[in-house]
Amino acid sequence: MNIFFFIYLPLLLYMLFDFKKAFLLYVFMKVFLNQNINLTNLPGVPILTLELVLNTCFIIYYFLIEKKKRQNHEKFPLKIGFICVFISMAISTIFSSVGFESAITRALQEIINNYIFVYLFWRVLCEEDERDVKSLIKGFIWVFLILGLYGFYEKFTGKNPLMDYEVSLNPSDKVLDWDYGDSNRLGMGRVKSAIVHAIGFGVYIAIFLTCFLFVISRFKKLYDCSLGLKIITIFICLSCLFFTNSRSPILYFLIAVIPIFNLKNKSTYGLIFMACVVLILSYDYISPYLQNITSIYSSQTEVRGSDLDMRMDQFDATFDIAAPSMVYGMGVKSLDIYFENDSDILGAESVWISLLIERGIIGCLSYIALIFSIFKLGIGTAKYFIWSSAIAWLVLTTVTSTPGCEISFFMTMMLIMNRMSIIYEKEFVSEYEQ
């Protein structure tokens, strides 16, 4: 038994007394969970992650107990996208090349962690008023300040005792350990903080930072904080975004941040001023990383990682693998086989690679339907921001995988932005500026 049980399992007891508060507290704490924190680590026994157990307990309790107490009939805005994903998974599971039993286990795990959890979050979020939404923003600020400060610790000490402890909990054949030394990426290393991979940490930071910047610039009447907290949060998150030494999270940030800079909005100029201050303060830290950003276009670089040519090679290998079952795929979990036996796909660094192999063309269409559903979350003040964020996520997952950060977090943050826009329109519609 490890320390994480004593940290997270009391949430299940708290759930019995106040489901809503316990669940929202779990939403914050869930960021720190990963595939190395398990309930079972025995050889020959399927991995049972703590995240899966907690998600399942909250979901079962809600549908058996809490749902009867709540009169919430608001339509779930991602319903069509979710249904398409479920149909795609069901078809690929039935025809899985790894066997139905293995495929259904993986499919259920993904559905629970990434989709039913998000549905449950939406049901709780629909009951939120202005005060509760403020609490969500405050909570995530503290979560990412903790992640960021620990990232600074890792950067300047070269040590990550939390990740070392998580790795020590697992047998060598089941552990996820992406260990990057100081020699990696132009000798600057890669920071992953409490997330299993540097890319995942960067994606978390990019999603939160763009949402935070949007909130303090466009939703000031709903939530505002001191100038000092704004500068500290932006400085820590922006620095850590570069410390990850990952190109794709920065690409997400640059796309998603575009609608924030509305020159007709006076608060934009304050945001630009804060951004300049943060850039000046952090320039010495981030300037060495700029070469890494441009290296994606060239194979003639010392930066280790896939350039565009390598990505094309991966797609060529993917089409060869998926050819026998291009329509519905080789089945959920089948990608694991090709990781072991086909080096040409390398790390399968695109969502389309995993979709084509595991769920075929139907899976790709279901993913497009899901992204379209996220687009439809864009209403009112948050309309263009959610649109740009959805495009940024689509670009991000096209050019790379996101180990350590699942789509559930992205959908969670977009639902919060959607909800804040609804509340803002209701309470401040007379002062709303398009």
Image (tube, rainbow, N blue to C red):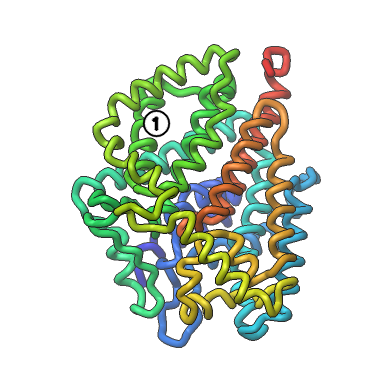
At 73% from the left edge and 24% from the top edge, which residue is drawn? 426
Quadrant in which the C terminus appears: top right
Q: Is residue 48 visible?
A: yes
210 shown above or below 381:
below
Total numbered badges shown on the rendered structure: 1
Q: Where is residue 170 in the image (x, y as percent from the top left)?
A: 36, 74
Camera-nearest residue between 344 and 56? 344
In which quarter of the view is residue 276 placed? top left
Quadrant in which the N terminus appears: bottom left
363 shown above or below 67:
below
344 shown above or below 254:
below
Q: Position of residue 73 (x, y in %)?
A: 80, 45
428 shown above or below 112:
above
Q: Position of residue 199 (x, y in %)?
A: 42, 53
Q: Is residue 379 left or right of residue 14?
A: right
Question: Which amino acid, mark 1?
Answer: Ile
Q: Mark 1 points at which residue?
A: 234
In which quarter of the view is residue 62 placed? bottom right
At 38% from the left edge and 37% from the top edge, which residue is drawn? 237
Camera-nearest residue between 284 and 102? 284
Q: Is residue 146 visible?
A: no
SS assignment at label 1:
helix
Q: Residue pushed farthest front? A: 300
At 25% from the left edge and 47% from the top edge, which residue is drawn? 155
Camera-nearest residue between 192 and 223? 192
Q: Position of residue 215 (x, y in %)?
A: 54, 28
Q: How crowded is mark 1: few (under 14 residues within 10 Å), some or many (20 or more)?
A: many
At 59% from the left edge and 73% from the top edge, which residue is drawn? 106
